[in-house]
Amino acid sequence: MEKKNSMVVIWCMLVYLAMAASAAPKSSFDDNFSIMWSENHFKTSEDGQIWYLSLDKDTGCGFQTKQKYRFGWFSMKLKLVGGDSAGVVTAYYMCTEDGAGPTRDELDFEFLGNRTGEPYLIQTNVYKNGTGNREMRHKLWFDPTLDYHTYSILWNSHQIVFFVDRVPVRVYKNADYENNFFPNQKPMYLFSSIWNADDWATRGGLEKTDWKKAPFVSSYKDFTVDGCQWKDPYPECVSTTTEHWWDQYEAWHLTKDQKLDFAWVQRNLVIYDYCKDTERFPKLPEECSLSPWD
C-alpha cells in the first residue's frame, strides 16, 4: 500500500508539472503551427507569444500543428471573444486531417458565443471513423472573455479527459474490447479556428451574428504538448506503454482529487449529455454504459 501511495504521489507531481509547464515561456507560433486559411485574419504580439484569430463577415481564420501525435497531453491558454459573440464559435480540437473527412477521428472543444451578459457554453464531442453525435455541453464557472484560461486534453488508450483549468469536465472511456467508438488508432493534428455558426451555435440558431460588432477576436498563448509525435510507419513511443506519465496506470483513471472536482462539475455545470438523451437515442450508444469513475 505504501509503495502504491508513493507511486500515486509521483504521478500527481508529474501531472502537475505538465499542467504548470504552460506558465513557462514558449516557442513562437511558427515553431509549432501553420496557418490553415485567411492569413490576413491572423496576427501575433510583438514577441510572438500571443496569437490572435479574427472573424468578420468575409471569413474566419484557423491554424494547425505541423506535427501529428498519437496519445499524450495537449494544452493551450485561450481568451474568448468578449461582448456580443452570438453565433461565433471558437474551436480548439484534435483531428486526423485538415478537413471534415468521412473517416476522421476528432476530439473537440467548441466555445459557443452568446449575447452580452449571457454565459459562454463549452461543447465537447468525440468522433471515431467519421461518426460523432457524442456531444456534451457545460457551463463555465468564470467569464472566459476576461482572462486566459487553460484548456487541455489527456489522451491515452484507456481514456480521453477534457480539462478546464486542471478540472476534468468530461471523461470518455475506452472498453476492454475492440470497438468503433474510441479513437485510438490514428494520429491527430491539433487545430484552432474561429468561424460563424449562427445557424446552430446560439439558442439553436435563433440568435444571429451581429456583424456590426465585427471583427470578433480570440486569443491564444502557451501551447504545451507532451505526447507521442508521429513518425511513419509507426513511432516507437506508441508501442511502448507506461514509459510516459500520460500512459502510466495512474493516467488511466481520475485521481481521488480529480474525482471530487469531476463530481462537482457533474452536479453543477452539465447542460447536456447525449448519454442521457433517450429521446434522441432510444437505445443509448454502447459507450454510455462505461463508467467515468472506473
Image: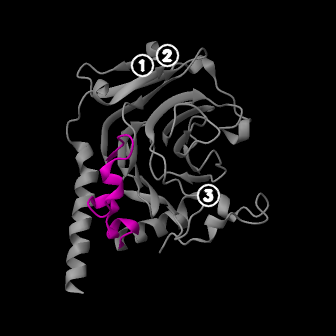
Q: Residues within 10 Å of mark 1 (few under 14, many from 20)?
A: some
The residue beneath circle 1 is: 42
In front of the other: 33 or 211: 33
Q: Magenta residues?
A: 228-255
SS class of the residue under badge 1?
strand
Q: Nearer the viewer, mark 3 or mark 2?
A: 3
Residue at image coords 35%, 40%: 231
| Residue type, numbered disc 1 | Phe
Count residues near mark 2 (Cα–Cα under 10 Å), then give few for <14, some for 14-19, many for 20+: some
Query: Mark 2 sits on what residue?
Result: 38
Quadrant of the rendered structure where residue 181 is? bottom right
Tag on residue 257?
none
Nearest-to-viewer mark from 1 and 2: 2
Task: Say which residue appears at 28% left-offset and 52% top-offset.
Answer: 19
- Asked whether residue 96 is in view, the answer is yes
Instruction: Say which element carries label 3.
Output: loop
Callout 1–callout 2 Cβ contact below 8 Å: yes
